[in-house]
Amino acid sequence: MPPASRRWRRVLRLFDDLAERYGYELIMTPVFEATELFSRAVGESTDVVQKQMYTWDDKAGRSMTLRPEATAPVVRAYLNAGGRGVAKYAYSGPMFRYEQPQAGRRRQFWQIGVEYVGEDSPTADVEVIELGYHFYVAAGISDISVQLNSIGDAESRAAYREILVEYLEARRDRLSEDSQRRLSTNPLRVLDSKADVAEVADAPSPVDHLSAASAAHFEGVTDGLTQRGIPFVAAPRLVRGLDYYTRTVFEYTAASYGAAQDSLGGGGRYDGLAQQLGGSEVPGVGFSLGIDRVVLALGNAAEPAALDVFVVAANKEDHPNAQSLLALLRANEMRADGLARVASVKAQLKAADRSGAAQVVTVDDTYEDGTVTVRSIADRKEDVVEIDKVVAWLSK
Ligand code: HAM
């Protein structure tokens, strides 16, 4: 609802522009998909699939799920469309997870994201991380920080898994029930367990057990980020809560967003996902950022006004001319408004004030001679201006 939605509009528009500037095309996937897509892609042993999906049978008895995330749907759509070559997608929309609701954690929440599909160069990872970083800074979250790790490829993972399991087995009794179970199904998930943060604090990190190819890729990412001037922090325990990741994983955090255990956004590389979904070998990397959390992190900072100018009719006879002026201003890409009904100047100025518009134009009988009175509220400047110069005056 306005006025809170002003902030939403600003940041969503910001993302739309930024993604377009980086060459990401809009993709829109359905709000629900076959349940199997998420259980295969996100992983049977993850919290998302085990506890958080809204799942039901449709009239034909097929199991459907409200999308808990968009990466799997995007890769599915890419494969459906032929599944070849490089594609850069941007998306924005609601996702659904059955979680315990609290500030910044909702059952319906809004993600924006990009997926760079079909490219395995570390330069793609760098571009994606940079784009997310610039989004936060432009949105007004200047203390944004990139937590970066690599969990390696399948080859690295097989070797690392043994080392990790040995470490965790020695502490099995002290682990939560969930983690004990995951120790045999998916031990990497244990590193992600909120209940076992202390127990895994000194666990071996995947980044110290990378294959030569994954180590070279990771170096490419860190070198690229350094060259681009994107600050990042090594996060050796970061593994992310979804199973499709390979190599690069990252999260965005900010001190201004208090909940330390919750990220503002996250992403990574998923070179095995397309194959897992029955396609050919197609690499990919992307991120998703939670807009509910971005809005919370921005706190009470003032948003720019939703209007540039409010048009006031001095008398009831001036109302039609005020409407013509509004049309002229809007045609010139100014955000302009006025009252639709005839009202006293006092009532109109009150509405102008409520609108937050920084400037007011008053239309009176001089309109027929080609002039209006313009007033800038901020610097208390008032001028009588010719109508064909009014846009230029207001834009100054
Ligand atoms: P994720 O870490 O599950 O990753 O979610 C990304 C972001 O969505 C989180 O950092 C958070 O800001 C927001 N989010 C998640 N759950 C909630 C919730 N219940 N309420 C509010 N916000 C929430 C993904 O979803 C992956 N698809 C990211 C990705 C893209 N990886 C590769 N490409």
Image: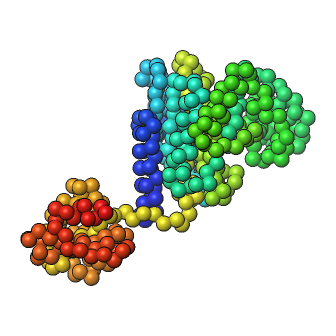
Considering only vertical position in the picture, is 382 above or below 8? below
The front one of 330 and 258 is 330
Whether residue 61 is visible, yes or no, is no
The quarter of the picture where the C terminus appears is bottom left
The front one of 168 and 349 is 349
Considering only vertical position in the picture, is 218 above or below 331? above
The quarter of the picture where the N terminus appears is bottom left
Furthest-right residue in view?
170
- In which image quadrant can residue 150 be found? top right
Coloured how? rainbow
> Measuring 75% from the left and 47% from the top, which residue is drawn there?
194
Whether residue 3 is visible, yes or no, is yes
Q: How many marks?
A: 0
> Measuring 68% from the left and 29% from the top, which residue is drawn there?
219
- In which image quadrant can residue 335 be found? bottom left
Considering only vertical position in the picture, is 56 above or below 184? below
> Measuring 50% from the left and 52% from the top, which residue is drawn there?
138
Find residue 238 and report its horizontal and vertical position in percent. 72, 40
- Horizontal side, residue 327 vs residue 251: left or right: left
Find residue 382 and report its horizontal and vertical position in percent. 27, 76
